[in-house]
């Protein structure tokens, strides 16, 4: 049910990608996402595909697991493809019926847009699959550190993020427990029209909110008892440190970006699919 | 009116990296009207097991029969099963949600399709059974103390008049008095009606005092399934899996070691006291 959503989940495995510094993964993911919009030719897509496939391979995250993460965006994907397909008027008309017109340019844009979106999702979920939420917030905190100078409370924001992330599985588990308890009392969460269904959520939502507030209270108390006062003067138990493999990863990433931009832009290889 | 489990297996998150075997070939039979205790170390599969009894979890393989009917059969009426097998979860007070105690207890009977008057009647009866004072019936469940909340939540299940009552550590986090009150109440209910009671607990003392039969779970499998005093004979094996026999068992074994000829299969403090007295009297009259 709720467990089927793999987007944003961590997939434990032992791989080169898992061991990389979170800062490297964050920067590289960002670069990859930007790079997807930096080329227009099929050779660019080819390189981006090969690169992504190689990273998936090295990361040892099963392909089926990644595909499952795409399910929630299927609707979005369909809408994008349809809009691009029918609303782009460009080039030769391939198909015309009533108000629908498909042009060569529209078809190409639709396919390319879909591929870009899918790669966008796979690329960013690959980062969360291989990085624990804690590492991720550590990385973000380190990367945003310079903003401290202009009085952005970077540490506090990062702390809030890591608490929020940490609470997701806890609240999911809590939801599951309360749901089961109410089902055991004869509650029905599945049938009925929209209003009945919304009403049937009350026995789930009230206890969930109560428990969330209770947990937040307990956590605040526990943090205070350990003398937590925010980020000022705070040191880390495991400070992030770049290793050779991290520099190597940066070099590979830069090489990829240069290649994909050069090939995708300079080579006039506009080989359309037909 | 019996529950029968045949080669039940349950695996969490099957087919992912988080795969975990929670139940391993469990075969059990719980006849009608019995008071059964289930005990086991944390993570031994007790909670997973009881969630199968009313169909909240579906076994990965194996069969479960309720009154001789396979509940995994196509078209089996799960709602009816859940009406008859009442499940009180751990910390049941976390499921309270209504504006007052009485309305919350009515939730179960109302879902069974009873009229408001009937639901109210059953709720009042259940609240009386768990011994909650009448002055609390109209207060918000969130204002009550921990023990009162627990009683309210248990009443919420009792109001459905289940034929089988399953309780998952109903006394966790309560003080000794609250614990005894609730367990005595359950034992009283069991005696008065012909309800089957399945009690999951960590406390050997509690189980020894109330249960007709004791099931010991270890690593997802049934380790012992016998009368409590027979199970406690294996107190060394129990220790190996992180459990222990009631303290009187140890005392009796120590006494035997020091040359007193007491029986070692007593399970409660009262029984132990009687047995020691009997031996002493016997000893004195003989010498």
Image: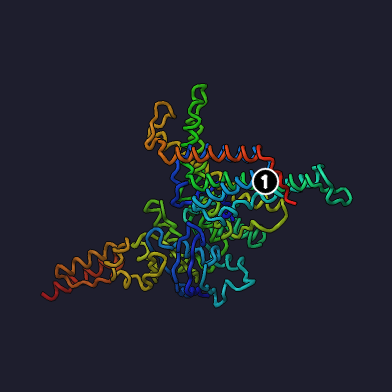
Label 1 Cα crowd, 10 Å radius (few <14 / some 14-19 / many 20+) = some
Residue B250 in the image: state x and y as whole percent.
24, 64
**Would you say residue B132 is visible in this rendering?**
no
* Residue ID at (60%, 46%): A47
Image x and y of residue B103, in percent: 60, 52
Residue in the picture at 22% in, 64% down: B251
Which x, y percent locates residue A149? 49, 22
Helix, strand or loop at mark 1: helix
Q: Residue A13, position in %: x, y?
A: 45, 52
Q: Residue furthest bottom?
A: B68
Work out whether residue B218 can be spotted: yes
Colour scheme of the picture: rainbow
**Does residue A91 appear left or right of residue B4 in this picture?**
right
Q: Nearer the viewer, residue B74 or B14?
A: B14
Height in image: B91 above or below B58? Answer: above
> The N terminus of chain A lies in which quarter of the figure?
bottom right
Q: Is residue B282 left or right of residue A109?
A: left
Residue assigned mark 1: A42
Q: Quadrant of residue B42?
A: bottom left
* Residue that sits furthest to the top in the current view: A150
Decide if residue A107 is on the left or right side of residue A231.
right
Question: Label 1 is found on which chain of the structure?
Answer: A
């Amino acid at each position: 049910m709720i467990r089927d959503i793999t987007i944003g989940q961590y997939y434990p495995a032992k791989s080169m990608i898992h061991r990389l510094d979170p800062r490297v993964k964050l920067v590289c993911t960002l670069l990859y996402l930007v790079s997807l919009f930096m080329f227009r030719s099929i050779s660019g897509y080819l390189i981006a595909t090969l690169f992504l496939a190689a990273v998936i391979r090295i990361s040892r995250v099963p392909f089926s697991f990644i595909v499952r993460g795409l399910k929630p965006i299927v609707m979005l994907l369909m809408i994008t493809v349809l809009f691009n397909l029918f609303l782009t008027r460009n080039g030769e008309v391939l198909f015309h019926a009533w108000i629908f017109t498909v042009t060569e340019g529209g078809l190409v844009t639709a396919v390319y847009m879909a591929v870009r979106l899918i790669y966008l999702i796979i690329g960013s979920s690959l980062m969360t699959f291989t990085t624990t939420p804690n590492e991720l917030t550590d990385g973000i905190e380190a990367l945003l550190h310079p903003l401290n100078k202009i009085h952005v409370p970077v540490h506090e924001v990062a702390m809030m993020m890591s608490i929020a992330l940490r609470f997701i599985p806890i609240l999911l588990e809590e939801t599951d427990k309360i749901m089961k308890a109410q089902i055991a009392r004869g509650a029905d969460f599945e049938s009925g029209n929209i209003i009945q269904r919304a009403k049937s959520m009350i026995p789930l939502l009230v206890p969930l909110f109560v428990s969330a507030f209770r947990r937040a209270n307990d956590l605040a108390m526990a943090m205070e008892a350990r003398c937590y006062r925010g980020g000022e003067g705070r040191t880390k138990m495991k400070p992030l440190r770049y290793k050779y493999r991290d520099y190597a990863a940066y070099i590979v990433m830069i090489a990829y970006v240069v290649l994909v931009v050069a090939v995708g832009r300079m080579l006039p290889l506009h080989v359309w699919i037909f | 009116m019996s529950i029968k489990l045949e080669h039940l297996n349950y695996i969490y998150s099957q087919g992912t990296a988080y795969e975990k075997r929670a139940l391993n070939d469990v075969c059990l039979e719980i006849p009608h009207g019995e008071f059964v205790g289930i005990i086991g170390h944390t993570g031994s599969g007790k909670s997973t097991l009881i969630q199968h009894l009313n169909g909240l979890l579906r076994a990965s393989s194996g069969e479960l029969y309720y009154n001789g009917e396979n509940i995994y059969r196509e078209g089996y009426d799960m709602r009816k099963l859940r009406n008859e097998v009442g499940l009180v979860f751990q910390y049941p007070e976390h499921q309270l949600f209504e504006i007052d105690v009485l309305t919350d207890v009515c939730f179960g009977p109302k879902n069974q399709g009873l009229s408001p008057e009937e639901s109210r009647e059953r709720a009042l009866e259940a609240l009386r059974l768990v011994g909650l004072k009448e002055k609390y019936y109209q207060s918000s469940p969130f204002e009550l103390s921990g023990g009162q909340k627990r009683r309210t939540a248990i009443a919420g299940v009792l109001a459905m008049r289940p034929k089988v009552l399953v309780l998952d550590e109903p006394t966790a986090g309560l003080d000794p008095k609250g614990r005894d009150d609730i367990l005595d109440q359950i034992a009283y209910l069991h005696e008065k009606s012909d309800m089957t009671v399945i009690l999951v607990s960590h406390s050997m003392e509690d189980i020894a005092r109330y249960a007709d039969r004791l099931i010991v779970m270890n690593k997802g499998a049934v380790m012992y399934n016998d009368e409590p005093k027979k199970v406690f004979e294996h107190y060394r094996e129990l220790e190996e899996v992180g459990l222990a026999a009631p303290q009187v068992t140890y005392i009796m074994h120590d006494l035997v070691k020091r040359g007193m000829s007491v029986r070692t299969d007593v399970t409660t403090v009262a029984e132990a006291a009687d047995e020691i007295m009997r031996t002493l009297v016997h000893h004195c009259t003989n010498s």
